[in-house]
Image: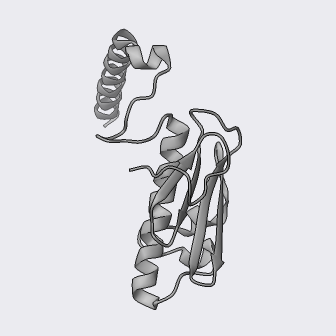
Amino acid sequence: MQRYYAGILAVGMLGGAVGLGQAQTSGPTSAQTSGTYQAKFPGDPARSDSEAQALGYTRVVLRAEREYKKRHDKYTESLEELAGTASFTKRMAHSTDRGDYTASYRIHKDGFVFTMTPKRMDSEHRSFYSEEDYVIHADDQKAADLNSPKIK
């Protein structure tokens, strides 16, 4: 029995060593070394990994809000109330600190406003704004608002 386990262990270690050798020889791509952003999907509007994460979070919030509105004929009062709708989880609602961004959600008479504000605004960290029309607006000069350019 010990030989059996020793054999499995040896095969596993050999496989790990081969995989490590392949990873070490493959090296970084030119995009990784130059620091340019690699689009996550065709038509990706993000300019950096941070923006991609912020936009991904925004899309999940907007999808969940749309679903919530269909079910309850009203918008949620808070992100916490949105938790459990579509793919928006309690964990996602728990913190507004989203890495390089801070999320903000507030309601008003006829809808809601959702923003993602970068901790440092520059060409790779734009601010994002959305409301009940589910369109995402972006701005790299100031806090995004309804008048900021729309993104795809």
Residue 141 place in picture, x, y as percent: 65, 40
Residue 85 in view, yes or no: no
Towards the viewer: 132 or 34: 132
Residue 54 place in picture, x, y as percent: 54, 49
Q: Quadrant of residue 39?
A: top left
Q: Quadrant of residue 121?
A: top right
Q: Is residue 14 above or below residue 55?
A: above
Q: Is residue 11 above or below residue 90?
A: above
| Residue at the spot 41% in from the left edge and 87% down from the top edge | 71
Residue 84 in view, yes or no: yes
Towards the viewer: 79 or 90: 79
Residue 83 as seen in the image, left or right of residue 64? right
| Residue at the spot 64% in from the left edge and 47% down from the top edge | 101
| Residue at the spot 70% in from the left edge and 38% down from the top edge | 120
**Residue furthest out toward the top:** 25
Towards the viewer: 47 or 82: 47
Query: What sort of colour scheme is used for the picture?
Result: one colour
Residue 130 as seen in the image, left or right of residue 2? right
**Residue furthest out toward the bottom:** 73
Residue 101 as seen in the image, left or right of residue 59? right
Residue 12 place in picture, x, y as percent: 33, 28
Residue 23 place in picture, x, y as percent: 37, 18
Residue 112 as seen in the image, left or right of residue 44? right
